[in-house]
Amino acid sequence: MTKKKGSPSSAGTYIYVPICAVLLACTPAEQASEAPTADIIVEGSYVVTMDENQSVIKDGAVAIKDGFIIALASTADINSQYTAAEHIKGDNRIVMPGLVNGHSHAAMTLLRGVADDMALMEWLNNYIFPAEVEFVDPDFVRIGTELACWEMIRGGTTTFVDMYYFPDIVAEVVESCGMRAMVSATVIDQRSPDAENASDSIRKGLEFIGRWKGKNSRITPIFGPHANYTLNADQLKATRAAANEAGVAISIHMSESPFELQYSKDTFGMTSIEFFESIGFLDGPTIAAHVVWPTEAEIPVLAERKVGVIHNPSSNMKIASGISPVTEMLRAGVLVGLGTDGAASNNDLDMWEEMRLAAFLQKVDRMDPEVLSAQTVLTMATSGGAEAIGLRDQIGALSVGMKADLIQVSFDDVHFVPTYDVISHLVYVADEQDVVTVIVDGKILMRDRSILTVDTKRVTQEARTLALRIQTSLANRNK
Ligand SMILES: [Zn+2]
């Protein structure tokens, strides 16, 4: 069944397009045998593929083997052609690609709600930096990242791009919780929890990348230079050179706030993106978080350089950074994905909320309800996001040969009754609680809302104990 642009055809039915071609793409050996075996078959009342044609299969199923999608078609076709050890039923469930969170600081879940509703510099100087200086160590990062992975799995996120300290610990947690992630070695020119200065963080970053590159196909080590106001031009150039030498991408905060824009003009005599381009920083894969303040001249540069822009609407709203010109960037051909940013500034890791806010924010800003459609926003959270972070050849859509990163969303809840348009409901109605199954790399991480790969009881206890110490310390400090 194929549905285009999220609009039901007449009488609310869907146009059936047999997907024999998809089945034929299976390996010849499998076609020859009677009933080839899959590891898992996942069914759904709808399979929202997010493929190039935005196909939606009604009463569809996905067959998974060795971590890959080996077939998808109608449930009847899949079940007549495959047997599987594990069969996940799909009545009243939507199967879709897992969500891609393009920008996060996972371990900051431990600083969630430590202070809110204040100016950025007061928040940073009186709360976040002191707490980080005193408490961020490998244990903090482990507990905070475990919390974050738990929250993200529960909400249907299967891939995230992270930027924090002690990246080895982040990578170890990602390895054990079963998610997919790009893990940045943070580069910042100040004494940080895991390095002395910029050159020390580049050196340590290269060592981290050496340890993790090619070690686990779910984990991509990258560089994460913080921003152009925490690193100078030489340090940024050195980070790009190190990233290119190691053959990895870079994730960075870019053109986030009016402060950054002014700083860039005062210090470099140019706006942020203009400056990055002038020093050759965009000569390699770049994931740019925020991009709230690009100039008209800078937007084509982002498109030309294939910079992956990650829009973080809730963080931009809460910190009052501004409204990113997402519509203009998409129109200019910029790759735009979605992210949550850290839970200390957001205050959660809920990609469903980011989707809704992304759409609403553009509409009210432009006073035009047509500017960012539900289908476009869903693309930003899945295939578009995967493209923005450079993983579109592996994830972000359901098609044969792609990694089996997918979720099931239940529509049993009252807010799904009735459902006229699946895409509209996914973007404007669904929330984390509706996600019932999460599969990454062909492994089940959540079944019927039970998290299988994080010891949630232990993590809760560890997080509460640590939070008590943080709270006491900040209270004494700010007396
Ligand atoms: Zn950030």
Image (tube, rainbow, N blue to C red):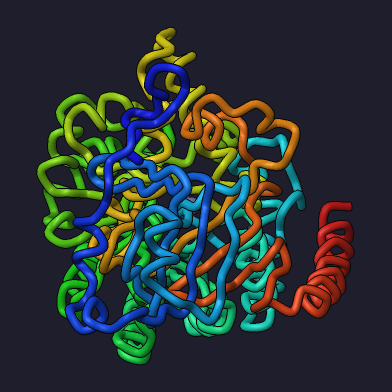
Give the image location of residue 234, x and y in percent: 21, 64
Q: Nearer the viewer, residue 173 or 226?
A: 173
- Quarter of the rendering occupied by the N terminus: top left
Left or right for 458, reference 355: right
Give the image location of residue 374, x and y in percent: 43, 29
Left or right for 155, reference 40: right
Image point (57%, 84%), residue name = 176
Image point (58%, 55%), residue name = 90
Q: Residue furthest top?
A: 367
Residue 105, above or below 357: below
Numbered marks: total: 0
Q: In the rendered image, which quarter is residue 241 located in?
A: bottom left
Image point (35%, 55%), residue name = 73
Can residue 17 be seen here? The reply is yes
Can residue 187 be seen here? The reply is no
Q: Nearer the viewer, residue 291 or 384?
A: 384
